[in-house]
Amino acid sequence: MTAINLHNNDEFSEALYKRMQSISPAIKGLELYEFRYALENVLPPGGWASVVIKPMAEVERLVSDSSFYTSIQLRPKQGSRMVMDPQVLSLLQMLFIGLVCGSYPAAWINEHFSFDVRGFYFIHRTRYYTKKVIQHMGGEPYRAFVPKQAAFENVQSVGYKAFKEANAEVDQAFINLTSTLVEKKGIPVIIAIAGQTAAGKTEIVERLQSAFRNCGKSLATVEIDHFLTDRDYREAKGIDSLGKEALHYDMLLGCIKDLYAGKAVSTPQYDFLQATSSHTVEGELKAGCQPLRIEPAEIIFMEGNFPFLLPEIAHLIGIKAMYLTDDAVRLKRKWKRDMDYRKKYELYYFLNRYFREQFLMAEQVYIPQMEICDLIVDTTRAEIWVSDEVKARL
């Protein structure tokens, strides 16, 4: 490999631009001068020659340590300007230098990281399929289809229309399978759809509801996110939306029990734009806010990130499904949904938060639920996994 002069920014940026195309196909959609615009924002103060890279094994240990993620700042500032977390930025700079200098092979980078062109930073590839998950799910997928999300590697953001079309076969198989399980279990039944942010939970619940409604079933939906307390309160307490501490939990538990007993309920309503609840932390309705009313039904949907981890609720759930999508694809969905349409976050808060939470949520929330759920619907791999218990029913 020809030596690159790290003191020459033009020479370095051109070499990086060429090599990054083997990391992210979406780079090919940029002209070199566009790539340089983005690169200027992450230029080290001492220049590229000042970056000291770590051995690959040390980098692997770093991004596999939860303490690395918990120490990431969500709103670091330089003066009055919010910036990328210094550790995330340092990792980005090391990977750039290592790729150009040949210290980090492209294959190794692709194995451990994905590059988001719009955010212009690397995120670690989360490993969701632990040995325990695979064993619980019988060692292999129950159904497999041709993966169609690979086309998303060429784009900077993903809208729901393209996402839905790519997932059509696996989604329909999931709908059919869930309908079969409801027939075997009987009603009333609670169906819990867990999954990561922007995995497509809300949309698949709507499609399942439509399928059951067409069969004459009465429906209700409990969206766990509506039981969240105010985001400012959670962040001040360091709660980060994980576990029952982030919720009006007693209200949620009472709601599920009452619905299962055939009673109508009144629940909090969460404003996703303002990130505030209709209720105070103490459970009182705020002035000017309206609660949600939910009528009892034959089929009760629960949607959220972690319904199976709530022990007082888990045993009431008849079908536990994990709806899974790769982190890199979900980030592209969030660009379209949360930044373009909802205009929900400040840029660097959005990037820092996503980098920080994917590993932590996988370790603390998603993987533990995959180890106990009935179904895993993996839209990126285009696979459906079922537990041995469900296989026996089928």
Image (cartoon, rainbow, N blue to C red):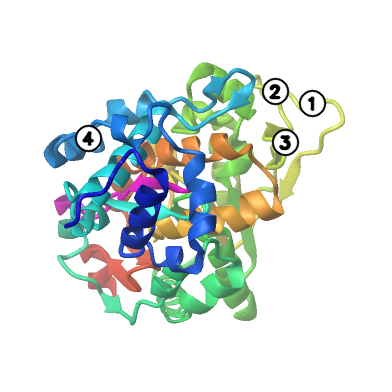
Distance CA(mark 4)–CA(mark 3): 41 Å
Quarter occupied by the N terminus: bottom left
Q: Could you tell whether 323 is left or right of 201 in the image? A: left
The mark nearer the N terminus, 4 or 1, is 4
**For mark 2, does the 10 Å Cα neighbourhood hold few (<14), some (14 to 19), or many (20 or more) residues?**
some
**For mark 3, does the 10 Å Cα neighbourhood hold few (<14), some (14 to 19), or many (20 or more) residues?**
few
Distance CA(mark 3)–CA(mark 1): 14 Å
Q: Amino acid at mark 3?
A: Gln
Q: Which residue is mark 4?
A: 53
Q: Nearer the observer, disc 4 or disc 2?
A: 4
Residue placed at 41% from the left, 27% from the top?
A: 86
Tag of residue 280: 2
Instruction: Kindly state the secondary structure of the residue where label 3 is placed.
Output: loop
Q: Which residue is mark 1?
A: 286
Residue placed at 55% from the left, 50% from the top?
A: 260
Residue 304 is situated, as x and y percent measured from the top left of the image, at 51, 48
Q: Amino acid at mark 2?
A: Thr
Q: Which residue is mark 3?
A: 274
Q: Are marks 1 and 2 in contact (CB under 8 Å)?
A: yes
Q: Nearer the observer, disc 3 or disc 1?
A: 3
Q: As rendered, which of 18 and 109 lies closer to the eye?
A: 18
Instruction: Kindly state the secondary structure of the residue where label 1 is placed.
Output: loop
Residue 123 magenta-drawn? yes
> Is 98 situated above or below 108?
above
Residue 372 magenta-drawn? no
Distance CA(mark 3)–CA(mark 2): 15 Å
